[in-house]
């Protein structure tokens, strides 16, 4: 893998794991899909064409190759409106093969966590995302430093162990 690859490219070349840690209570608040949800639009679980998107094909392809995809979200409760939206639109990710868990922020006390969201591929390549205070993505950086990677693996696994599987979590 090389610096500058897109998330989709990283996912195409990883061989056994893709971990994603999300720690914000809102992202890209100007997203048209989020605005549609706020206006009452809901995706129909029985109408795959209403929610299928290219990202989900990447998930299907990766998991078919044996890549374990896991996403952990640390969320404040009561949840923000954005997190409620994110919860409502997570079922397609799960159906595509991604495992998703939710950790109420109050249960994260005592965990050593990195300062930023990240993707970690094959426990060797870290893709860190940077966001503005309003949740807009402002950059990303790739790291392969073994100590930093180990820290992020440890942080992710600690969150995962405490987190609630998507099917069991109910946003407060």
Image (cartoon, grey):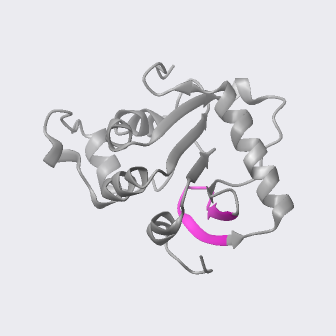
Number of marks present in the image shown: 0
User: Is residue 9 toward the left or the right of residue 47 in the image?
Assistant: right
Residue 73 percent coordinates (x, y): 58, 38
Name the image quarter holding the N terminus.
bottom right
Residue 34 drawn in magenta: no
User: Is residue 69 toward the left or the right of residue 121 in the image?
Assistant: left
User: Is residue 76 toward the left or the right of residue 90 in the image?
Assistant: right
Residue 118 percent coordinates (x, y): 64, 56
Predominant secondary structure, magenta span: strand
Q: Residue at x 53, y 77 (%)?
A: 5
Q: Residue at x 68, y 71 (%)?
A: 142
Answer with the quarter of the image where residue 103 lies.
top right
Q: Residue at x 21, y 33 (%)?
A: 45
Q: Residue at x 70, y 38 (%)?
A: 157
Residue 126 percent coordinates (x, y): 68, 63
When the figure is inspected, residue 132 is found, relative to residue 165, above or below; the finding is below
When the figure is inspected, residue 21 is found, relative to residue 28, above or below; the finding is above
Q: Which region shows up in magenta?
A: 125-141
Q: Is residue 44 visible in the rendered structure shown here?
A: yes
Q: Nearer the viewer, residue 102 or 76?
A: 102
Residue 3 percent coordinates (x, y): 62, 80
Residue 129 drawn in magenta: yes
Q: Nearer the viewer, residue 74 or 28?
A: 74
User: Is residue 115 toward the left or the right of residue 132 in the image?
Assistant: right
């Amino acid at each position: 893998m090389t610096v500058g690859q897109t998330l989709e490219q990283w996912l195409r070349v990883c061989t056994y794991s893709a971990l994603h840690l999300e720690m914000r209570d809102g992202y890209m608040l100007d997203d048209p899909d989020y605005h549609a949800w706020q206006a009452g639009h809901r995706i129909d679980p029985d109408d795959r064409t209403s929610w299928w998107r290219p990202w989900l094909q990447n998930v299907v392809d990766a998991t078919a190759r044996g890549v374990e995809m896991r996403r952990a979200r640390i969320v404040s409760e009561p949840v923000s409106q954005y997190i409620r939206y994110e919860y409502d639109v997570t079922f397609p990710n799960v159906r595509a093969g991604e495992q998703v868990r939710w950790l109420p922020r109050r249960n994260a006390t005592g965990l050593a966590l990195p300062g930023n969201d990240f993707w970690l591929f094959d426990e060797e390549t870290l893709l860190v995302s940077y966001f503005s205070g309003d949740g807009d993505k402002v950059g990303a950086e790739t790291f392969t430093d073994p100590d930093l990677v180990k820290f992020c693996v440890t942080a992710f696994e600690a969150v995962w162990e405490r987190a609630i599987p998507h099917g069991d979590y109910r946003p407060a």
